[in-house]
Image: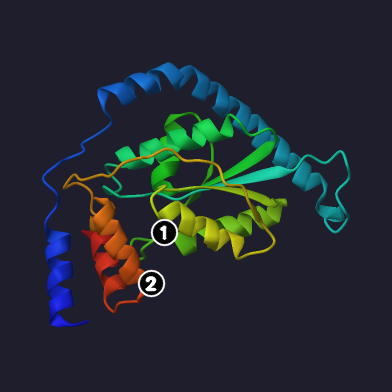
């Protein structure tokens, strides 16, 4: 990496935006209270659905190679990718709370059994809404990137026979990239469900500089595509700082 590029990245990571998003707005808090009852019902329905799916998969282990019958109910996979990180003591941050609510809204409209795999930051938001999920986490030294989260979900979905997958992620650039990643595996069909705008976490508490605004995330995406040397070290530093 050139000295100019290194200096630019250092300045970008060390100067958070002045505007700060310290939590959910009063309007959003009111909306969350209004939907708390409905989300509790979603959580109850989800646990019933998931238990039924597991029981069905267990009973069919000996006949996994058999073609599905007309009475089989398909299981839809929902995979959720976090955006922004305030650290283990402060998660879920505002962006991941909004992604959790997006999952709750999507799950309430799924007309079949479903199985959720979520990156750990969003998983905390889902638990607070009463929605169970399989959690994707990493050790303290590794940065948990999009590809790693999908690899975990991919393995779980194959084990229970999921064919249709609904990805949930930051709708600005990230969601399209995730859909493309999943579509590369022809064993899965991508269900494109809309995800509402979740905004940006411009707080100094957010340790990931690339999630503090659209220009930063666009620059980060370009750097990733260009495979700029040193980017992985910067991400690890963001995780451990």
Residue at the image position 14 percent from the left and 70 percent from the top: 8
Choose top left, top right, bottom left or bottom right for residue 110.
Answer: top right
Disc number lying in front (2 or 1): 2
Instruction: Tell me if residue 232 comes above or below residue 167 in the rendering.
Output: below
Q: Real-space Cα distance between discs 2 and 1?
A: 23 Å
Residue 234, given in percent of the width and then of the height, sits at 25, 68
- Image quarter of the N terminus: bottom left
Residue at the image position 36 percent from the left and 49 percent from the top: 83
Name the residue carrying label 1. 138
Q: Residues within 10 Å of mark 2 (few under 14, many from 20)?
A: few
Res 141 visible: no
SS under mark 2: helix
Residue 57, given in percent of the width and then of the height, sits at 76, 46
Mark earlier in primary sequence (2, 1): 1
- Image quarter of the C terminus: bottom left
Choose top left, top right, bottom left or bottom right for residue 143.
Answer: bottom left
Instruction: Tell me if residue 40 comes above or below residue 207 in the rendering.
Output: above
Name the residue carrying label 2. 225
Give the number of the disc on residue 12.
none
């Amino acid at each position: 990496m050139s000295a100019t590029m290194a200096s630019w990245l250092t300045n970008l990571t060390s100067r958070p935006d002045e505007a700060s998003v310290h939590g959910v707005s009063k309007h959003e808090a009111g909306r969350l209270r209004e939907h708390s009852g409905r989300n509790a019902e979603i959580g109850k329905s989800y646990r019933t659905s998931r238990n039924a799916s597991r029981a069905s998969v267990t009973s069919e282990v000996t006949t996994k190679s058999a073609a599905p019958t007309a009475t089989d109910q398909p299981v839809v996979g929902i995979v959720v990718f976090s955006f922004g990180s305030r650290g283990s003591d402060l998660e879920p941050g505002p962006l991941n709370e909004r992604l959790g609510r997006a999952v709750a809204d999507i799950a309430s409209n799924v007309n079949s059994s479903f199985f959720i795999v979520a990156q750990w930051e969003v998983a905390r938001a889902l638990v607070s809404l009463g929605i169970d999920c399989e959690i994707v986490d990493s050790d303290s030294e590794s940065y948990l990137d999009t590809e790693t989260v999908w690899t975990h979900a991919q393995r779980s979905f194959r084990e229970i026979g999921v064919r249709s997958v609904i990805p949930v992620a930051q709708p600005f650039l990230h969601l399209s990239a995730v859909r493309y990643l999943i579509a590369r595996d022809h064993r899965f069909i991508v269900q494109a469900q809309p995800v509402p705008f979740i905004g940006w976490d411009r707080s100094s508490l957010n340790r990931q500089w690339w999630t503090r605004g659209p220009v930063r995330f666009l620059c980060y995406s370009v750097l990733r595509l260009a495979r700029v040397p040193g980017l992985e070290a910067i991400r690890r530093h963001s995780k451990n700082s």
